[in-house]
Amino acid sequence: MDLDGVLAGLDAAGVWLDPGLSADELADVERRFGFTFCADHRDLLTLAVPVGDHWPDWLDDDESPLRARLAWPVDSVVADVLAGDFWPASWGPRPADDLEAQARRQLEQVPTMVPVYSHRYLPSGTAAPGVPVFSIYGTDVIHYGSDLADYLEREFLGRSSRVPDVSLRVPFWSDLVDSVDPADR
């Protein structure tokens, strides 16, 4: 993954890039918000921090917008559950009551999704480099890049080819991309 080349392209395309975060700043963000950046996300934020509309401002003193963006993937899946449109068989029988609490308990088991830009997310955790970027809107989840560099080229630098098949799976979120319920396997 050539983040240096992509960052040069982003800069040329007019994306504002602040200096990268220090190891202490990254650790502070992870501590405050309770997740770990995946390797690709960490690499990007160490080199440069894209800023502006729709980019997360990890150093902002007002944590509430970031907390809302971190909650968005789960909250939007719960909204689909409450609308009656979603309840995977792998979660067991759909409960008659306390539906939201039951759904949230199930979703506590899935990787936290960390915002990259708008409703594009990377999974938290220590996954190896090359994890796909997800576009998440409720249970409408697709890959928006085979990895972070691929995503940034697609979103900002005009790459328009089909996203290559992604072999690295992220529990739950990859199942939504593939419209697969683990209970059906």
Image (cartoon, rainbow, N blue to C red):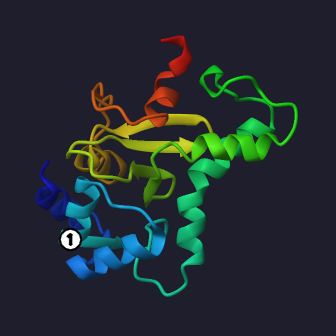
Pinpoint residue 21: horizontal percent, then vertical percent.
25, 78
User: Which amino acid, mark 1?
Assistant: Thr
Extreme-bottom residue of the structure: 61
Q: Quadrant of residue 139?
A: top right
**x and y percentages locating residue 19 in the rendered image:** 22, 80
Q: Is residue 109 above or below residue 176?
A: below
Q: Residue at x 33, y 54 (%)?
A: 156
Tell me: 82 left or right of 110. Answer: right
Name the side, left or right, on which 53 lies relative to 125: right
Q: Nearer the viewer, residue 76 or 124?
A: 124
Residue 180 appears in the rendering: no
Instruction: Write the residue at 83% across / 43% down.
Output: 98
Q: Nearer the viewer, residue 69 or 97?
A: 97
Could you tell me residue 158's position as x and y percent?
Answer: 30, 46
- Indicate the quadrant where residue 7 lies: bottom left
Residue 2 versus residue 182 in the image, above or below: below
Q: Which residue is mark 1?
A: 46
**x 20%, y 62%: residue:** 43
Q: Is 117 positioned to the left or the right of 66 in the image?
A: left
For residue 106, what is the image quadrant?
A: top right
Q: Residue furthest right?
A: 97
Residue 75 point in image, percent of width and height: 66, 51
State whether residue 8 appears in this view. Answer: yes
Task: Give the SS element for disc 1.
Answer: helix
Rendered residue at 27%/46% (across/down):
127
Task: Give the mark count.
Answer: 1
